[in-house]
Amino acid sequence: MDAFRMLFESKGYYICDSRDSEAGYQKIAIYTNGNNVPTHAARQLPDGLWTRKLGEGQDISHTIESMSDGFYGNVAMIMKKKL
C-alpha cells in the first residue's frame, strides 16, 4: 500500500476521507485483498460513479460498493487531487 500511496502522491493525489464527488477534484479508490495487497484502483467519474479497466480496451462503471467483498477486494484508501 505504501508504494501505491507514494505513486499517486507523486501524481498530486493525497489521502482524503470522503467518497463523495467534489467539484474541482478527481478521486481514486485503491482496493486491496484480505492480505492488504492492492488489487486495483478505480477513478471517480463526474456523475459520482467509478470506472476501471476490465481487460484490454474495456472500461466499466460501477458504484464504489458494488465491487466490495469479492474477487476485487475492498476499498482501502481514497485519494484526491485538484483538477
Image (tube, helix red, strand yellow):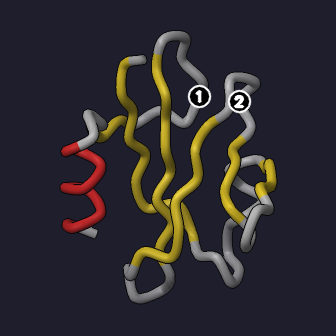
- Residue visible at 43% across and 61% down? 76
Classify the position of the C terminus by image quarter.
Answer: top left
Residue 55 higher or lower than 13, as above or below: below
User: Given contact means CB atoms under 8 Å apart, are the residues at marks 1 and 2 in contact?
Assistant: yes
Count the marks. Answer: 2
Name the quarter where the N terminus is drawn: bottom left
Rendered location of residue 70, percent (x, y): 71, 80
Which residue position holds label 1? Answer: 20
Q: Amino acid at mark 2?
A: Gly
> Which circle's residue, 1 or 2, is located before the other in the chain?
1
Residue that mark 2 sits on: 48
Front one among 27 and 11: 11
Q: Amino acid at mark 1?
A: Asp
Give the CA separation, mark 1 to mark 2: 7 Å
Residue 19 location in percent, x, y?
Answer: 55, 36
Q: Residue at x 59, y 28 (%)?
A: 20
Q: Residues within 10 Å of mark 2 (few under 14, many from 20)?
A: some
Instruction: Please state which of residues 64 and 54 is positioned toward the viewer in this rendering.
Output: 54
Question: Can you name the residue that lies furthest to the bottom here?
Answer: 35
Helix, strand or loop at mark 2: loop
Identified at 19% across, 55% down, the residue is 6
Extreme residue in the top direction:
23
